[in-house]
Image: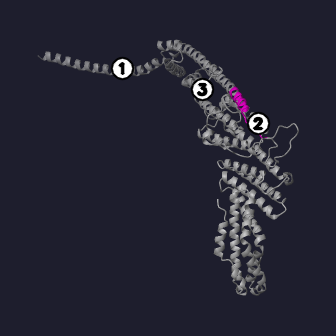
Amino acid sequence: MEQMLSTFQCDLSSISSEIQTLQEQSVAMNLRLKNRQAVRSQLSQLVDELVVPANMISTILEAPVTEQEFLEQLHELNNKINYVKEQAFRETMACADVQHVLEKLKVKAVTKIREFILQKIYSFRKPMTNYQIPQNALLKYRFFYQFLLGNERAVAQELREQYVETMSKIYLSYFKSYTSRLMKIQYEEVADKDDLMGVEDTAKKGFFSKPSLKNRNTIFTLGNRGSVIGAAELEGPIIVPHTAQKSDYPFESLFRSQHYALLDNSCREYLFLCDFFMVTGPSAQDLFNTVMGKTLAMFLKHMDAYVCDCYDSIAVFLCIHIVLRFKAIMAKRNIPAVDKYWDTLLEILWPRFEYILELNIQSIQNMDPQKLGFLDTRPLYITRRYAEFSSAIVSINQTFPNERTHALLGQLQVEVENFVLRVAAEFSSRKEQLIFLINNYDMMLSVLMERAVEESKEVEGFQQLLSARTQEFIEEILSPPFGGMIAFVKESEALIEKGQLDRLRGEEARVTQLVRGFASTWKTSVESLSQDVMRSFSNFKNGTSIIQGALTQLIQYYHRFHKVLSQPPLRALPARADLINIHHLMVELKKHKPNF
């Protein structure tokens, strides 16, 4: 029994040692499994990334580049190439096995992409192509260029150069022919150096010179030319020369059309370059300049040549405002591509505008009133031109105010005012001089009020001049019929103010004569005064306001006459019975107020 138990005990102890051994073996196996799993996860990723599947090879080799599958496999290939580069750097041995396969696939993909993009670029060159269509097609495959840039820089550079060269030529030829065709439909009668504000309408030109503009005044009027900077026309469709019905577009309309086409194409081109060639900031600007540089230089040359010989200041001023507006549109679209060009253009246009204005100022300075031939008191054609021109420039300038323009217009205004005074001095009588001045000021004022804002400096200046001259004229026309009474009233008021009432005692005979004279002649005098005024002034409305002013002034004088006669020395005069009642006089004079 004892022997059996001791054997059993031995067996038990050997079992426990076996269990311990098994436990150790289990731990070791577990560790090996973990290690293998860790290696596997890393290796499987490595193998997955390195293995080139048959599907990829067949797609890259055989599928057309335009298919979606090719694009997907190209993305995949790009990832594999980058991964192998990374692993080779870590000296992974397996890379050597796949490198040559990937290299061959890359060469094949680059060749196919190069052919495709070149073919698209060459399709731009076909005449009458709408190059926006192939451009949009290229944008769909912008990853192709990215792939080339990452894997074959030389080819990417070659394609970029091809594109730039092709587009540069296309834009240049398109805009060159468009500009020359546009200039053929320009208004035939263009202002020349003799068409200035201070040039007589009768001025003779040389024997061989072409007849002057049918009507020189059209150079100074805005008419409906201002609509070119209105919202509707500014961004309206461009002019198509071969379908244009009429051949009398003013220059600013052609300029707008030409530059709106430029603005549109520049915006689209700039966005395409940024998108497809993946450039931003200064490098985008440089690339844009290589594409559009020749075109912009051609435009500047054309503008320079045209502006040198242009004497139409309104056209130049409208062009300046078109540029300012186009500049604002591009800023709103956040495209700086053509900013420098706009600035250069303004540097050409501003000095010319100022030069033409200075020529006009000079022409008025040098104008000799004696050359005007027969003078009458109606408004001069020169003041009419000034008024039209000034209101045109002021109304355009309101939208983008510019101080330099204000200064030049102020200078022009001073010269015109001086000129009007110089011509007025040619009339012998003061009355004629005043009629002439009032007619001219009134005409300038009415034209300016029609177009410009009422607060403008010009309007204010002429209003002051007009009211001063009108007041003087009223005194002038009241003087012949009622001068005696007016003089007496002024003298007597002066004496009353000094307190020398006694000196009025000796005036009885004079007063009696004045009272009776006024009572008997005032009606005929007022009648002839009204007719005289209406004959003198070309503006009916102005004439009527002068008559009203004169009659009001007359009532005031008569009222003051009454007051003087009510003073003690003259109060007892029998002639006072012949005085007309003020209210009766007012009622009678109202009948003379002209009715419209």
Query: Decide: marks 1, 3 in contact (CB < 8 A)?
Result: no
User: Circle 3 sits in a helix, a strand or a loop, which is it?
Assistant: helix
Q: Name the one closer to the observer, 80 or 30.
A: 80
Q: Which quadrant of the structure image shows residue 147?
A: top right
Q: How is the image coloured?
A: one colour
Q: Which mark is residue 33?
A: 1
Give the spatial CA distance, label 1 vs label 3: 62 Å
Relative horizontal placement of residue 15, taking residue 317 as reference (left or right): left
Residue type indicated by callout 3: Gln
What residue is shown at x 32% (from left), y 22% (from top)?
Answer: 27
Q: Can residue 367 be seen in this view?
A: no
Is residue 186 found inside the magenta-colored segment of the image? yes
Instruction: Return the residue at label 2.
Output: 306
Range drawn in magenta: 173-191
Disc 1: CA contacts within 10 A as few (<14), some (14-19) or many (>=20): few
Find residue 423 and report its image quarter: bottom right
Alpha carbon of mark 2 to alpha carbon of mark 1: how far? 87 Å
Q: Name the residue under label 3.
A: 132
Which callout, 1 or 3, points at the residue further toward the start of the chain? 1
| Label 1 residue SS | helix
**In the current view of this chain or complex, which residue is farthest to the left?**
1
Residue at 67%, 54% in the rendered image = 449
